[in-house]
Amino acid sequence: MEAECRVLSIQSHVVRGYVGNRAATFPLQVLGFEIDALNSVQFSNHTGYAHWKGQVLNSDELHELYEGLKLNNVNKYDYVLTGYTRDKSFLASVVDIVRELKQQNSKLVYVCDPVMGDKWNGEGSMYVPEDLLPVYKEKVVPVADIITPNQFEAELLSGRKIHSEEEALVVMDVLHAMGPDTVVITSSDLPSSRGSDYLIALGSQRTRGQHPERLLPLNDHMGTESRGSCESGCRGAPHARRAALTASVHLTGSGARGRPG
């Protein structure tokens, strides 16, 4: 019998729609992972709507929840998955938790989606507070094993622009140098040879002491009706995180596996 594979998923929760933990939990359960969902925010709906209301957790509230897990000795994880948050202190405290969990389990894999913003009509903008960017660059990305930014987020983190696949390679090398062994740029505005209905994603995996292995390009078909849709865009990143998480189970050679669905 294969060992249980448990994931701590620290992401957003919305009442209406499927983003963050609402999007990630069920698919990962179907794949056989046990999911402990810790909500970084609780919103009425995602912030692409004209209006949204809700609560944002801070570091003290995060530590209170995590302390409850520790007191019951159930803070044992194979993976940590993080996504959307809006509070700088919360994000910095996530790093403390990841470090502690890695001390307990040296094989733990941390998958980070540095959710900060995206591009619309060629122009990028952040939809989280700007003070999160230095926390991601200086604290979060260096402890991550896998990161899954979109093109705009990869440019923010690296300080470089992407206009071609060659420039994307340079950006991924910069991100590797910051810490992560696996970099997946989950979406880009680079043109696809298959036409405008396809979205280009790019990937790179570094093995210690070796040059990165490139996965270029990855074409994902998009129906023309969904292109430019905020809801569709918000669903894309959780899909990529789930794919990266599932692949990382095999890439790390860990004995723990998700149970067959």
Image (cartoon, helix red, strand yellow):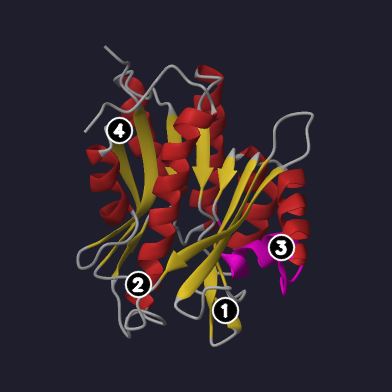
The residue lying toward the viewer, choosing from 224 and 246, is 224
Residue that appears at 66% across and 39% down:
181
Q: Earlier in the sequence, mark 4 or mark 1?
A: 4
Residue that appears at 44% across and 54% down:
240
Q: Quadrant of residue 182?
A: top right
Give the residue furthest to the top.
1
Instruction: Give yes or no for contact between labels 3 and 4 (Cβ–Cβ under 8 Å).
Output: no
| Number of the front mark, 2 or 1 | 2
Q: Which mark, residue 33?
A: 4
SS assignment at label 3: helix
Give the Cα separation between the discs numbered 1 and 3: 19 Å
Instruction: Give yes or no for contact between labels 2 and 1 (Cβ–Cβ under 8 Å).
Output: no
Q: Earlier in the sequence, mark 2 or mark 1?
A: 1
Q: Earlier in the sequence, mark 2 or mark 3?
A: 3
Q: Which mark, residue 125?
A: 1
Q: Position of residue 51 (x, y in %)?
A: 30, 82
Q: Earlier in the sequence, mark 2 or mark 4?
A: 4
The residue lying toward the viewer, choosing from 138 and 87, is 138
Is any part of residue 159 visible from this angle?
no
Give the Cα separation between the discs numbered 2 and 4: 25 Å
Give the Cα separation between the discs numbered 2 and 3: 24 Å
Q: Position of residue 167 (x, y in %)?
A: 76, 65
Q: For the N terminus, give its image quadrant.
A: top left
Residue that appears at 50% across and 81% down:
196
Q: Earlier in the sequence, mark 1 or mark 3?
A: 1
The stretch of residues the image draws in magenta is 149-165
The amino acid sitting under disc 1 is: Ser
Q: Is residue 145 left or right of residue 219?
A: right
Give the Cα separation between the discs numbered 3 and 4: 32 Å
